[in-house]
Image (cartoon, grey):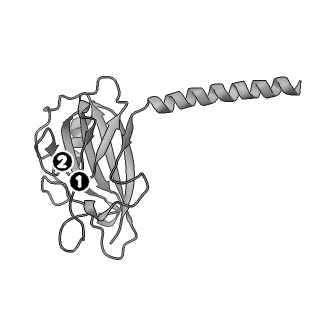
Amino acid sequence: MKLTRTRFASLAGALVYGCFGTAFAAGMQVSSASFADGATIPALHGNNTSDCGGKGVSPQVSWSNLPAGTRSMAVLLLDPDGNMGLGNSHWVAYNIAADRGQLKEGEGQTSGQGVTIGKSVRGEPIYRGPCPPVGDAPHHYVLTVIATDLAPTALPPGLTRDELMQALKGHALGGQSVIGRYAR
């Protein structure tokens, strides 16, 4: 009897693992070769102003296993710890053809090459790298990729993060994030 229970438990465990493993693997995937999820963001990607110590190069980000019907992508970098907890938007990129599969390191700093850049924390349409106040605990930077059913040229240039989120209502098909930390 013990042998039968063991076999049954092994079979049930394999079935449960197989079901959950398949469901997880089939979902949208987002990653960055520039930094691992939960790791420190290199200074290369920090703000390039004199007091921030970074180089201002936008990070690499890739996506795969997109939902059916995906036509374009949006990429956002948000510091939820910034602005006294109200958050700062460091990167708003959209109108990116889904079949590209990625933005390479340094792509998407300004509009062009199949990417539209919206307004970042200072109201400029550029990638503005992390730059938390000196002495703060490391801030968390959420790099989010959103799959949409919109054509890659559907949205106008210069949208803020909030305007982009409003425009994506009813058009977002899925999204995933990776989180990096940055301090000075």
Residue at 14% of width from left, 32% of height from top? 154
Q: Secondary structure at mark 2?
A: loop
For mark 1, what is the residue? Answer: 58
Image coordinates for residue 109, horizontal then vertical, percent: 16, 52
Image coordinates for residue 58, horizontal then vertical, percent: 23, 53
Instruction: Give above or below for 87 relative to 135.
Output: above
90 lies left or right of 32:
left
Instruction: Give above or below for 121 relative to 175.
Output: below
Image coordinates for residue 12, horizontal then vertical, percent: 70, 26
Q: Are marks 2 and 1 in contact (CB under 8 Å)?
A: yes
Mark 2 Cα-neighbour bin, 10 Å: few <14, some 14–19, many ≥20: many
Q: Which numbered disc covers residue 94?
A: none
Q: Residue furthest right?
A: 1
Residue at 35% of width from left, 62% of height from top? 81
Q: Quadrant of the N terminus?
A: top right
| Amino acid carrying mark 1 in the image | Ser
Instruction: Give above or below for 177 relative to 120.
Output: above
172 lies left or right of 4:
left
Q: Which numbered disc covers residue 108?
A: 2
Q: Earlier in the sequence, mark 2 or mark 1?
A: 1
Q: Secondary structure at mark 1?
A: loop
Residue at 23% of width from left, 34% of height from top? 100
Quadrant in the picture for residue 97: top left
Image coordinates for residue 76, horizontal then vertical, percent: 27, 47
Q: Quadrant of the C terminus?
A: bottom left
| Amino acid carrying mark 2 in the image | Gly
Q: Spatial distance from mark 2 to mark 1, Cα to Cα?
A: 7 Å
Report the label total: 2
